[in-house]
Amino acid sequence: MRYLAHGRPEGGLPGNGGEDDGHGLIDHLEAVGRLAGEFAEPFATAEISRLAGLWHDLGKYRPGFQEYVRSPLGAEAHIEGRVPSRDKTHSTAGALHAIECFGHVGRTLAYLIAGHHGGLRDWAGGLDARLSSANADARREYDEARAAAPDELLALDAAPDLKKVPGGSSGCALWLRMLFSCLVDADFLDTESFMDEGKAQARNGFATLAELAAHFDAHMETLKVGAGGTADTPVNRLRAEVLAQCRNCAAEPSGLFSLTVPTGGGKTLSSLAFALEHARIHGKRRIVYAIPYTSIVEQTADVFARIFGTENVVEHHSQAEADDKDETARSRRACENWDAPLVVTTNVQLFESLFAAKTSRCRKLHNLADSVIVLDEAQCLPPEFLQPILDVLNLLTRHYGVSVVLCTATQPALTSRSYFDAAKNRRGLDAVREIVADPPELYRRLKRVEVRLPDWDKRSSWEEIAAELAGEDCVLAIVNTRGDARKLWQLLPKDTLHLSALMCGAHRAEVIAEIKQRLKDKREGRDDRPLRVVSTSLVEAGVDVSFPVVYRAFAGLDSIAQAAGRCNREGEQEHGRVVVFLPQQQAPPGHQRLAADACRDVLRNSDGDPLALELFEPYFDRLYFGIDLDKKGIVRDLTPGRGLEIQFRTAADNFRLIDDEDQATVFVRYAGYPGIDALLGKLETGGSERRLMRKLQRCAVTVKKRIVDRMAMTGDVLEVQPGCFVQQSSSLYDPVLGLRDDENAVLPAPTLVI
């Protein structure tokens, strides 16, 4: 009898002589073992990865499974969630065989094999019961599979040597997730090559990193200062110096790097230049450019696409949207496992994947080995998850051939710290090399603004701030909350522009484009109208605008520095003006309040430049001291016990950089988004395919769940699918201010007379 792993995708096999149409089980196991072993070679544990591949589908030797795979539903027999009977399950047998062969050390393999469909499980309360000798169903699956499997497949191999685990006990959980990634990706790829050869072929065709480097060099030639390229200004000359230093530093050995450059100093292209050259010199396989905010991802991906071509840039985030002409089969496939040479993604995708348990999220992890990871705006690493993030970055750079670049204008304090209270200690990044030769001197030469701090004993009313703003011809005001933005906007002339996250992405993009165009027209003398903008901090997230005057509500020092980066960005004047003010209300409780308090402590004891580079380390030290850097206990859950007990699923569930349990999304009928009514119509009639949801993300607004519940009760929104709400009332979305969320109700038109 020829044992089968999969039936043909059209369903079922011919009854007589048709077994050749199926995917041979031993062929599948050997192919997955070979691929999984190859994937693990960069971190020197190929043999255990190969063994996981050989044993992962051992349960498919069961008579019940072989009967099912030959049925009309055989094409889906390998997907355990769709198999209607316990007699057809197959992912437990190999896990039990690993434990039978190697004792508790075999649990390393058991995690991988038992989870290759449903994801990594906790040991306590999960795999311990599933693999218990008291579990009759699991024992029957193993006994039936072992009786039919060939002896050479069951033969003992060398037991996993836990002394060779990269990083020892503290690195065991990441190592197992890396091996899990090797197994899952190998299984998917071999199954895909049988089920749909066209999909497998669609993965090919990306340019190599060497070819991308050639494209980049050609592009940078067109931007050379003078000679018909970039204007010969002091700012552009300094950008050219930063670029040259990045290229020169690329020969440094692999590891941890920082790129500390003031906002507007050309960090994006310079960091990419370093990554490309570093990858060429050290044989890295890919570059992953990780960014904290979706808006910056889109902007950065657009820049890269202009250099390398859209077809060579994989943009992977929850709101990624490409036109049919831009998105290709291979770019969609590459989002599954990041097997492209250049990936632009978010911190959420990167770090939640590094701590994930689901197969779909873990599948890409092994492709991070021997890569260059650029962390743009590194100061945005979430403090409440900082310790597990620092731990995983250390493991990647020490044991997986990864180079990490911490790229920011406000470098956070990430080195190790010890305190009298050991609970406050920080295991940091202690071997970071700065790429720029003299950051303080660079900051001095790139200083383009003067900062006016507030009187610490005086708070300003919104009316007072509005009166000052109304006297400016071109000004940006940045405040701490959506409600504050609306209050201030209300007090300004009616042509004042507004930006906040209560506006959908398409709406914000339209307003930002208008701001950029009007700024350009004002600089070139084509527009003499006053330009006043009120925004939340979202405008600080990589939005390249340059105002002569910026007002900033008091906040963390990094936020003030980012606000200053929107002032006199190109050095159009000798010094721009940044005015920091204390609003009537303190910053919101939580991270914003702690950041503001740390900033006040640092600035009150300083008489010099409020944005001096040397102030950021004490600022971040004070901020991090006041926060539990592992609030969710991720390190505890991922530290193996004596019997290799690890709580993978619990850690993954807790490692959520965006806590959406108390939030809900409303899809709004923004008139500026083409075809929005038709798209929402598809959603309301049950459509939920990936491409539809991605397009609709541009018209999504996230608010608190209790607010959406009230909107649903009044009929303003309709829940068309579980957790999916669509605007029904035409008055719910204001064309200037965005979603009316009750807590920040739209007020009458501005009445302030100027």
Image (cartoon, grey):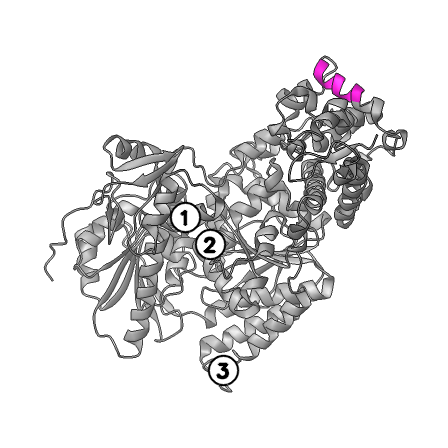
Secondary structure under badge 2? loop
Position of residue 675 measured from the top left corner of the image (x, y, whole percent): 34, 53
Q: Report the residue marked by disc 1.
A: 697
Range shown magenta: 136-144
Q: Report the residue marked by disc 3.
A: 229
Nearest-to-viewer mark from 3 and 2: 2
Residue 143, magenta (yes or no): yes
The amino acid type found where label 3 is placed reads: Gly
Disc 2 vs disc 1: Cβ atoms closer than 8 Å? Answer: yes
Graded by Cα atoms within 10 Å as few (under 14), some (14 to 19) or many (20 or more), the crowding at tag 3 reads few
One can see residue 698 in this view: yes
The amino acid type found where label 2 is placed reads: Glu
Task: Left or right? Give the position of 742 relative to 112.
Answer: left
Position of residue 560 measured from the top left corner of the image (x, y, whole percent): 38, 56
Q: Report the residue marked by disc 2.
A: 321
Residue located farthest toward the front when viewing the structure as drawn: 16
Graded by Cα atoms within 10 Å as few (under 14), some (14 to 19) or many (20 or more), the crowding at tag 2 reads many
Q: Nearer the viewer, residue 333 or 444?
A: 333
Q: Earlier in the sequence, mark 3 or mark 1?
A: 3
Image position of 400 with respect to 26: above or below: below
Q: Nearer the viewer, residue 632 or 443?
A: 632
The amino acid type found where label 1 is placed reads: Gln
Disc 3 vs disc 2: Cβ atoms closer than 8 Å? Answer: no
State which quarter of the image contains the C terminus.
bottom left
How far apart in space, not on screen, are marks 3 and 1 (Cα)? 37 Å
Identify the residue at horizontal 48%, vertical 52% (top origin).
320
Nearest-to-viewer mark from 3 and 1: 1
Identify the residue at horizontal 32%, vertical 48% (top origin).
677
How far apart in space, not on screen, are marks 2 and 1 (Cα)? 8 Å
One can see residue 427 in this view: no
